[in-house]
Amino acid sequence: MKYRIQHVTEYQYADRVSHCYNLAHMVPRNTLRQRCLSTQISVSPEPAHEHRREDYFGNQAYHFEVQRPHQKLSICSSAQVETSAQPFADNLDFGWSCSEVRRKLEQSRDHECLLAREFLLDSPMVKTVAELKKYAEPSFADDKPLLVCVRDLTKRIFNDFSYCPEATTIATPLEEVLKNKKGVCQDFAHLQIACLRALGFPAKYISGYIETLPPPGQEKLVGSDASHAWLSVYSPGEGWVEFDPTNDSLAGEQHIITAWGRDYFDVTPLRGVIYGGGDNPALSVSVDVARL
Amino acid sequence: MISAKPTDTAPLEVMNYVASRPGACDEVFDEAGNVKAHWAQLLSSLKGMGFDAFADRQKKALRILRDDGATYNIYDQGDAGSRTWGLDLVPALISSEEWASTEAGLLERAELFNLLLKDIYGERKLLRSGVLPPEVLFAHRGFLRACQGLDLPGEHNLVLHAVDMMRDSSGQLRVLTDRSQCPSGLGYALENRTVMSRVLPSLFRNSRVHRLAPFFQRLRVKLNSLSPSDDQARVVVLTPGAHNETYFEHAYLANYLGLDLVQSGDLVVRNGFVWMKSLAGLSRVDVILRRVDDWYCDPVELRSDSQLGVANLLEVVRAGRVAIANPLGSGILESPVLLKFLPAIAKALLGRDLRLGSVQNYWYADAEDRAYIDAHLDELVIKPVFRRPGERSVCARELSEQQRLALKQRLAAAPLDYVAQPLIEAAPMPSFDGRALQPRPVIVRSFAVACDNSYALMPGALTRVGVDESSFHISNQAGSLSKDTWVIASEPQLNLRDDEQPEPQANQSELNSLPSRVVENLFWMGRYAERAEASLRILRTVFVLLNGEEDLPDTVRRILLGAVTKISSTQPGFLEASDEELADPEARLLGVITDANLVGSVRSNLNAMLFCSDESKELLSSDTLRVINDIRDALGELDASFKPGLNSAPEEALDPLVTALMALSGLVQESMVRNIGWHFLQLGRRLERGMQTATIISEFLSPELAPAEQNILIEAMLLSMETLISYRRRYRARLAVQSSLDLVLLDTSNPRSLLFQIEAIDEHLKRLPTNQEPRHELQPEQRAILEAQSSLKLSVLTELSQRDGGERKKLSDKLAQVGELLALISTQISDKHFDHRESSRQLVRSNWEF
C-alpha cells in the first residue's frame, strides 16, 4: 500500500523563546516491509543549523537549532511510503516454542540472536517488575509456539485495558497503568514489552502512524489520523514480529513505521532544550495518512 | 592532614623503617630481608635527616600546598569538606628496570583499550563474535548509543588512559581499575612533584628522578593536534565547577597547560560550532579537555536534566567541528566487567596475551562466578559495575549481619550490576604518619597519553597511601595521603626543572578572551570584599561607642544601629526595632556578623567573596591565594570569638578580618597584572565603596541633631572611614560638619573620599574593551560617571552643611543622587559585559535514568 503522510507539530509558547536545540524522530525509516519513496522535514522559524542522520537503531534522526526569537515553533514532516503486510496471517501456530526460544537466546552465537539480547534488558522507561510477569504468565507455556502466546497476550491487554487519553502522561509508571487498566497506545506497548522481557523474550518499541478509516458513508477528516505505537518481539528463526495491543492485531499494511528503539525514550518524536518560553506551552499535532 | 607532634621516641629509631611482617613481600625489602638498592639511599637520607628536620619539612610542605590552594573536596560536607591535599613526603620509588617492564605493560594496555573503545562504538566485532556477552555493553549505563560512530582525528580515540595498580603479596603488579573518561590525578601528581622539589631539594636532586614535564608537553601537543581548524587551536578545560572534588586540579592543569578553564555556562553551540562567551564576544572552541562525566555533557541527547553540559555538543562533535578528550562514551571502558573478559579481548584485538594482568574479577551475572562469590563473600570486595555518586565498593567482611543481608539482596536483584574482586594484601611501603615511618599499603595511578602512533607513559604516578594497614581503605574520599612517585634513573637526568612550563603558547587566555564568567566573578569579588569591609568598619565603630564611658543619647544610638543595618543591607534590622531592642542590640549585632543565612551579614558576604575567588582562582597570584586562605581562617575563628556573646572588647575580634581584607586589596593593587580582570575587580571595589561612603555620610550628617550629638556622629563617621587622624591633624580637634565634608566628600588625596572613588571608577571605565572604539556619543555609564563627578565637584559646602528645617536636605539629596548613579553604572557594566544566561528547560520533561 502507498501512503502520503503529513505530520505537523506546533508549539505555541507563553513567552518568547530566544533559541532552542532539538532532536526529532519524525522521518519514517526503511524496514523489511516498508520503503520510503520520499521524505521531507521542515521547521519554522528557519533553523540556523540542521542535520539528518541515521542513528544507532537505524532510525532517521533530525537535529535542528533555531537561533532567532520565536513564540511559535512548527515542524512539518511529510513522506511517501510503500508498506506491505507482515508475512504471517493471523494464524501463528508455528515456529519455536517458548522454551526453545529461551534456550536459543542463551546459547546461539548467531549475530541476530546476540544483538536481540539488547532488547531483553530494562530500558529507561521500561523496568520489569514481578507484577507484570505475573500478569503475562497465563498467556505462556513452555511447549507452545512463542508467537501464539504473544498473540494471546496482545488480545488480553486489548480486552483488559481501556483506551483513555486522560488517564496517563508520558511519566506514568507501568505499575500504575497495570493497576488502573487504563492508558494509551504508548502505555500498552510499554506494558507488553515489559511483560515479554520479564519472561525472557526480546521486545522493542515501535513508533509510527496508523491509517484510520472513516465510518462507512462519511468523509475522512483532515488531521484525524494519529501517531501510534506498538511493539515487535523477537523469535529466532522468524525474526522480529510486530504486534499491536491497542488494536488487538498483528501490525499490517496500515501500520507505518517511523522509528524503533528500546522504548519511547529512544524515539521520542521531539526532544530538546529551549531557552525562555514560559510555562505550559500549547502543543498541537495533526497527522494525515492518505492512500495514494 | 598530617600534624607533626614530637614524641618521646628517639628520633633516629622513629625514622628507621622496618618491615611490618618479616618474610612477607615488601616494596623496600627483598626476600632475604635486605633493603633493595634503589631504596637504600632514600632510607639513609631520611635517617640522617632525623625526626625534627623531617617533621619540619612536612609542615613546610603542608603550608605550600595550602597556599597553592591545593584542595580535595569531600562530598556531602559543604564548605567544611574542602581539605588541603595530603602529601606524604616519603616518595614512592620505582627502579628503572622495574619501570621499563611495567611501562611496556601499561602502554600495551592503553593500546588495547583504544582498540576496545573503537570496536564498542564501531563494528562491535567483539560482541558479534561472542568474545563479549551482549549484556556487558547493553546493560551498562556508560554505553552511550548516541555516541555510535564518533571518531577523533589521528590513530587514537582514547587520548588519556589511567590505571590503578597494586603490588600483591606475590610481588606481582595487578591492575585494579582503568580510568578512561576524565582520569583525575594528573594535576595532583604535578603539584606533588613541585612541592617535593621545593621542600626536599637536595634529596630530589641527588636521586636522579625522571622528569614529568615532557609528559605534559606531549599532552599539550596531542590536544592541539585534535583541533579541526588550521588556525591556532583554542583548547579549553571543561570543569563542573568550583564544588567538584578535584576542582583544584582542573584550575591547576588549565594554568600549567595554558588553557582556558571553562564551565558549562561559558560555552554555547551556535550555527554548528562550539563557542566560548568572552568579553570580546564569542570565540570558537576547537578542543575540549573534559572533566565532566560523559552522560552529563549534552542535555539534548544525553541526561536531559544536566546543568553541567552544553546543549547540542554531540552534534558538533559528530560534524567533526570540535574534539573532546576523552571522547564522549569512553565511560564504558571503566566497567569492571570488561576486566573479566580482558584476556580474551586481548587475544581477539592484539592477537596475544597481556603482559600486565588485572586482578581477578567475578561477575554476578555469570553462573559460575555467582557460585564463587556466594561461597567466598568474606574474601571479596563487591564493586558496582556502574559508578553512581555515593555508591562505593564494599568489603564484605566489614559488614554487619544486616548489611550483608542487604548486600546479598542487592546482588540477587541486579546481578548484571555487580562484580567482585579478591581483597589484595598489598606490599607495604614506608609512610610518615606524623610520628614515625609506618608500613602502609599503596595504590599507584599511572597515566598514558596518546602521541603520534603510540602512547607515552608519565614517568611517575600518583601514589595513594592506605589510612591503615588494610589495603581496602585507600581513597581520597577516605582521607588518604598521596606520595610523589619517583622513577629512579640509572643515568643522571638532564638538569631541567619539572615545574617548567611546556613550550610557550600564543597568549590564548589573554585579556579580552577571558570567559565572561571569570570577569564577572572578579567584579563581584571586589564588591563583596568591600561590602564586608564596610560592615566590619561600621561594626567596630559601633562597638567602641556602645562600650564607651558615656551613655549614648537614644537618638545617636538609633542612628548608629540604623547605619549598621543600612551598610550591611540587612533591612529591616534595626530600622524597625523597638526601644528595648535598641537598648540591648547584642543578638542582632551578632547576627550581622556571624549568621551565614542572613543575606548581608559579614559571613555571608565573605562566603560569597570566597566563592567568587574560587571561580576566578586561575587569575590570582599565589600570594593572593594565601591571603584568601587567611580570610577563610579568620572567618572560621569568628564563631569561636563570638560564641560566649559579645565580650568586653568585641571590636578586637574583628581586627584580623579587617587586616586580611586590607592585605587582599593591597596585594591586588601591588601584584596583579593590570589586565581586564584587574579593572573589573577594581571597578567592583570602587563602586561598592562609593555607594557605602555615600550612605555613611548621609546617615551620620544629614539628620537633625543637637550639636553634642552631631559631634559624636562626626567622630563615628571619621573613625569608620579611617580618617579621624587626618582630620584631627588638619583641623586641630574641632569637629565641624563643613570641614569633615571637605575631607570625606571632595578630598581626592583621601583614598576613602567619595570623589576619589568616582575618579577611580572613571579611569577604570575608560579601559573597558567596548569603550575603546571611537564613538562620540557617551555611553550611559560614561554619562553617569560624568554627572556624579560634576555634581560633587560643583558642591558648595556651606550650602550642603546648612540645615534646611531640621535636616540637611541638600546633602542627603546629593548623596542619594550619586548613589543612584553608581548603581546605574553597576547595572550597565553587568548588562554589557556579563553573560545573562536564560534558564533552559527540557522540551519533554523527563526524569528517567538511563
Image: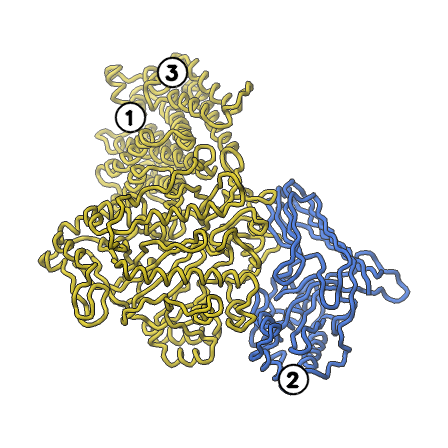
* Rendered residue at 76%/75% (across/down): A87
- Which residue is disc 2 drawn over? A97
Secondary-structure class at tag 1 = loop
Above or below, B36 relative to A156: above
- Name the residue: 36% across, 65% down: B175
**Disc 3 or 1, which lies upstream in sequence?**
1
Q: Which mark is on residue B801? A: 3
Query: Which chain is indicated by disc 2?
Result: A
Q: Colour of chain B?
A: yellow
Mark 3–mark 2 Cα distance, whole angstroms, equals 102 Å
- Tell me where residue B84 appears, x and y as whole percent: 30, 50
**Callout 2: SS:** loop
What is the x, y in percent for residue B230? Answer: 53, 41
- Whole-angstrom CA distance, mark 1 to mark 2, is 93 Å
Mark 2 burial class by Cα count in 10 Å: few <14, some 14-19, many 20+: many
Q: Quadrant of the N terminus of chain B?
A: bottom left
Which chain's colour is blue? A
Q: Is residue B572 visible?
A: no
Task: Indicate the position of residue B100 as horizontal and vertical percent values.
Answer: 31, 60
The amino acid marked with disc number 1 is Glu
User: Is B823 in front, or is B834?
Assistant: B834
Q: Can you tell which of label 3 and label 2 is closer to the viewer?
A: 2
Lateral position of residue A200 relative to residue B829, left or right = right
